Amino acid sequence: MRSSNPVFSRRGFSRDNAYAGFNTPPQAGGPTATQGNPYATGAQPTNPYAPGAQDLTPEQMQQLYGGQAAPPRADRMTMDDVVMRTAMTLGTVIVGAIVAWAALPVSSKSYGIAIGSALIAMVLGLVQAFKSKPVPALIIGYAAFEGVFLGVISEMFNARWSGIPMQAVLGTMAVFAGVLIAYRTRLIRVNARFQRFVMAAAIGFVLLMAVNLLFAAFGGGDGLGFRSGGLGIVFGIVGVVLGAAFLAMDFKQVEDGVAYGAPREESWLAAFGLTLTLVWIYLELLRLIAIFRD
């Protein structure tokens, strides 16, 4: 199972980047070769997270469950699990940021610690992305080091533009609430076309930012100017919109995981994905507000 995120690819509730999580081609001789209408043949619906059931297509899942949720399971993921795990990961990020802000004054040494923490967080995130199962220690470790990075960076921004971190936090909360309302009211419909468009836009955005960073590192200044002035505002808005789109995809994955009876441990991946996306949105808003304040 794999999904997409603007920071890195992570395991989620879909296989091979397929929408809704179950359109992997059926294997010869697999369960889909003999299953017809389960209600016509007397067959019982199969748990999609049971061994061998991951080969079902969306149409076959629709036939098996009639568009309804999977049969109840004692160890299946619930929305409460996702909320609790997300609170734990985000809480760890916040605690790490507060400790870093209080203990590390603005200096070149603090900046070095921030970069080191970001690299460690990235490594932990990548290790988790390639794991077959969620590892809570990796996810919490990622959150802790990401918090240190955010705390130092936020303090540096605040030293130049007083109050900007709180503005970015409020903006992130507003984006989260807005996307959640739009998703629940179906103003945003996450489908295969939506996913392809968002992924194409995100790849282009990340490549442009990488090129801009290289020009800035070797040529000095603002590189190609994608992070300052008028272009900086445009790309900042694009970054926030992309983060909002990935947030909607995260909501869809959580909804599918609960509906299809994902194992309870998958709630850690849902929390990990939501944390990644919210960090992305916060950083984009921090840069965007800084441009306006400048």
Image (cartoon, rainbow, N blue to C red):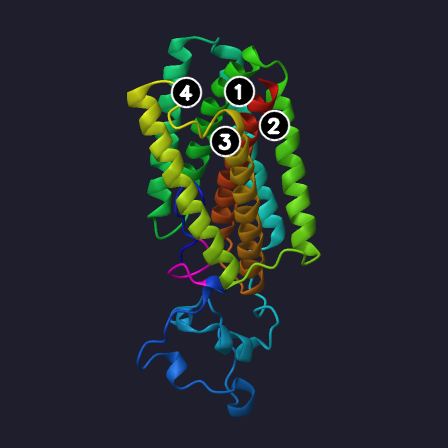
Rounded to the nearest angstrom, the CA distance separating label 1 from label 3 is 22 Å
What amino acid is at disc 3? Leu
Rounded to the nearest angstrom, the CA distance separating label 1 from label 4 is 10 Å
> Helix or strand or loop: what does disc 1 sit on?
helix
Q: Residue at x 57, y 15 (%)?
A: 158
Vertical placement of residue 218 versus 198, above or below: above
What amino acid is at disc 2? Ala
Quickly name the residue at label 1. 154
> Helix or strand or loop: what does disc 3 sit on?
helix
Q: Quadrant of the N terminus?
A: bottom left
Vertical placement of residue 175 versus 62, above or below: above
Rounded to the nearest angstrom, the CA distance separating label 1 from label 2 is 10 Å
Q: Nearer the viewer, mark 1 or mark 3?
A: 3
Quickly name the residue at label 2. 168
Q: Earlier in the sequence, mark 1 or mark 2?
A: 1
What amino acid is at disc 4? Ala
Q: Tell me if mark 1 has few (under 14), some (14-19) or many (20+) residues whose alpha carbon lies within 10 angstroms of its own.
A: many
Asked if the residue under mark 2 is in contact with the one under mark 1, i.e. CB atoms within 8 Å, the reply is yes
> Helix or strand or loop: what does disc 4 sit on?
helix
What amino acid is at disc 1? Ser
Residue 284 visible in the picture: yes
Give the magenta range.
12-18
